[in-house]
Amino acid sequence: MRMPLRLAPALVLAAPAAAQAPLPESTVPDRSTADPVLAALLAEALGKHPDIQRADAAVKMDHERIPQAGVLPDPTLSLGLQNDGFNGLMVGKMETSFYSVAFTQPLPWPGKRGLRKEAAAIGVDLSEATRSRVLLGLEADVRRGYAALLLVRGQQALLAQQAIFLEQAERLARTRYEVGQGSQGDLLRAQLELTRLKQSAWALEAEERTALAGLNRLRQRDPAEPIATTASLAELPEPALLAPEAIEARSPELAGARASVRQTEKLLDLAKLDRRPDFAVTAGIMPRGSLDPMWQVGVSISLPIYGRHKQQRAVAEHEHHRRGQGAEVDSVRTLLRQRTEERTIQIDTLRRTRDLYREGLLVQSEASFKAALAQYESGRAPFLGALEALNGWVGDQGAYLQTLAQLQAQHIALREAALGATPPITGGALASASLAGGAAAAPTASKSSAKVPGKAQDSGPAAMKM
């Protein structure tokens, strides 16, 4: 008795992502914010996060230091009494007995105050660079968390499709067994795989809750608060590539290193001026009671007589610091260019891998599954063959989702201008049948053991740095 093939129509409906045409390359920088959910998450996180508030406070604090650096040192008011003898107060009786009131104003060598003010102003640039890193890092964390949430939900949808297929396969195996055309082992094996799906479903549910908790932390919400998504990972627009010069312009570390060089140059100029003496002007009056008062005016000059061991050493110190800061700029620029080149290579490889899935692998995997199921239905192939084909289709779909996720990860790290390794975007593990009888295990989307095209590896042209 020939059994009807029920799985093929469901399979056609279950893989819409595989039939999608490749997304056109964007010419507008970072179109991913066109997703209203992502845009809302970014606005909320960037508006509320304590790290941004702390960075803003640091910038304002450094702004307050600028006028302080350019002000004259505080003057000194001196009060005194000079008296002849110890037998009584002789002010007004003796010419050399008097009260004294003196005012002293220190005056730095011309140019010192201006250099201190300029150095303080560059300190604002340093704090601005720190604030930019906080903003870029927070934005990247939100984007990575959102992509991870979409990845997990895509895996959940794929798992639901796999469950539908296995339930239909279980009904087919049951019917064949009841009419004497199949074995009890096929029926038990289908039931076993359905039970295994529950374990994977629970794991994916935990991954989803973890992703939600991470996103809610970034926007200062309750960890369990739900986030409704309207787009899939395949529908998330791919940002345009940035030129290396644009990435250097975005790098807070490079901007901070350059600002440090400028600040050190100002401090070096100030150290050279410290070899010049400072001045102090003093004016005072000395009342003498009934006698005519006296007054005084004076100028004092500091003597940098220890300049060989003090001021010259300070000049040498800042000279060494300037050379070190210049080397730091070169080091940061070189590392940033390396990371940019690495990520550009990764993006190119992942794009080609994504297109290969869309145009070939997913279509071929679907056709293989259909053919294997038709052969099992007609009795020309064992149940394990159909199970292996289903497992291969699920593995290819999961690997495709991982490729999309890692492509987003590389774009996010590129726009973040991060000097460190690219953080991966990970999801859960999909269930796959452990095939016996010499059948090869099909690829899975497990993040622990699967090696799928475009997923992070330690080496190779498609490797994503961990």
Image (tube, rainbow, N blue to C red):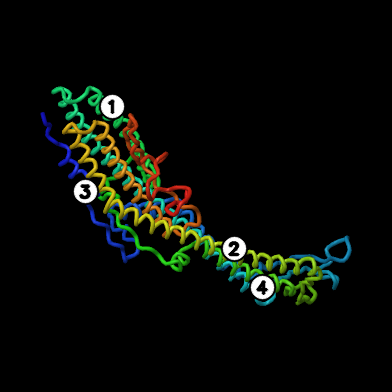
Q: Are marks 2 and 3 in contact (CB under 8 Å)?
A: no
Task: Tell me the distance, in whole angstroms, between the alpha carbons under discs 2 and 3.
Answer: 50 Å
In the displayed structure, 34 sits above or below 115; it is: above
Label 3 packing within 10 angstroms: few (<14), some (14-19), many (20+)? few
Q: Which mark is residue 278?
A: none
Q: Are marks 4 and 3 in contact (CB under 8 Å)?
A: no
- Provide the residue designation for mark 3: 16
Identity, as a three-letter code, of the amino acid under mark 3:
Pro
Give residue 269's mark: 4
Q: On the image, numbered disc 2 is attached to which residue?
A: 328
Sequence order check, earlier mark of 2 and 4? 4
Compared with 7, 314 (above or below) is: below
Q: Secondary structure at mark 4?
A: helix
Point out the tag, 4 or 3, that comes first from the N-terminus.
3
Measure the alpha-carbon separation of dots 4 and 3. Answer: 67 Å
C-alpha separation, residue under disc 2 versus residue under disc 4: 20 Å
Q: Residue 170, position in %: x, y?
A: 20, 29
Q: On the image, numbered disc 1 is attached to which residue?
A: 192
Marked residue nearer the N-terminal end (4 or 1)? 1
Q: Dot 3 lies on which element?
A: loop
Label 2 secondary element:
helix
- Where residue 280 appears, x then y in whole percent? 73, 73
Task: Say which quadrant the N terminus sits in.
Answer: top left
Frontmost of labels 3 and 1 is 1
Q: Nearer the viewer, residue 16 or 414?
A: 16
Q: Residue furthest front?
A: 380
